[in-house]
Image (spheres, rainbow, N blue to C red):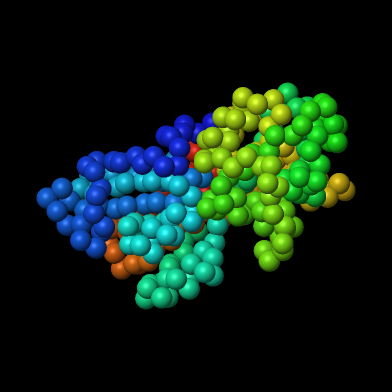
Amino acid sequence: MKKTVAFGLCGMALLFALPACSKSGDNESKAGVSLQIKGSDTMVNLGQSWAEKFTKLHPEINVGVTGGGSGTGFAALLNKTCDIAMSSRSVEDKEVAKAKEEKMEFAEHKVALDGLAVVVNPACGVNKFTIPELRDIFMGTKTNWKDFGGKDAKIVLLSRESNSGTHVFFKERVLKLGKPKGPEEYTPNALLMPSSQAISDEVARNPNAIGYFGMGYISNKHTVIAIANEKKSEYVLPTMGNVKSGKYPISRPLYIYVADSTNPTVKMFLDFVLSADGQAVVKSLDFVPFN
């Protein structure tokens, strides 16, 4: 799979057409209409590509896309500083409760599928893991590559920060073995990285590193790990076919959430995302089309 071109770290916004400064509830201006999209770092390149294609069809609409993590997107929706939240996880109960306090209701739209790729530096000499083995690594139970048939070297753990939906999903699926209320947590020795691109770059640079991110960030500088639920199970790579069929053990949907489904600009953008053209963008960035 080819590497998706990254447009910067999670705090960086890419704006299309004219600067989008106002919330869409009061965004009628001489410059046209603005649409603010915030959230998942996994999806930020996808959101930027959607925005670029969308504004070619609707040049009167100014679209701003910002990453920062799924939690950032939900917070922006609650604060009414964005129109659309991108998320690589489902909305949490506490976020739904806060929305109700604000007399808001989040509408969920599945827009793509993704496999969370686990990657290592090619120098470590390992290419497959079971889910329990990954659990041991990211909880700090086992700390040396020789425990898994690799070289005698300390494992360098890379994780996304806690406001990331990718961080949350990996913890629930791998560390908690699919039980969201479990007590398991990442080892304090894990290095928390600000973006998927930061993990991608560090794994490529550090011969002892292991990390995880959406499959759109895989490059030929990584060894992609084949994963099995247990040793007797089939080891599976995060390919489009394996994610779509559900064979890959760490697969997930990607979402768009909105708080105002009556906004015509938001509806136009959602319709584009789920159209053939919008889903072609998903495939072009090595994610899996939902439609």
Q: Residue at x 48, y 45 (%)?
A: 41
Q: Residue 39 in the image: state x and y as whole percent.
A: 44, 51
Residue 56's spot in the image, x, y percent? Answer: 28, 41
Q: Residue at x 36, y 41 (%)?
A: 13
49 or 24: nearer the viewer: 24
Q: Is residue 234 left or right of residue 191?
A: right
Q: Quadrant of the N terminus?
A: top right
Q: Residue at x 30, y 41 (%)?
A: 15
Q: Quadrant of residue 159?
A: top right
Is residue 256 visible to us here? yes
**In this rendering, does residue 57 appear at all?**
no
Give the total number of marks visible in the rendering: 0
Residue 155 lies, in percent from the top left, at 74, 34
Identify whether 116 is placed above or below 221: below
Q: Residue 203 location in percent, x, y?
A: 63, 30
Q: Residue at x 43, y 55 (%)?
A: 73
Most extreme residue toward the left is 30
4 or 64: nearer the viewer: 64
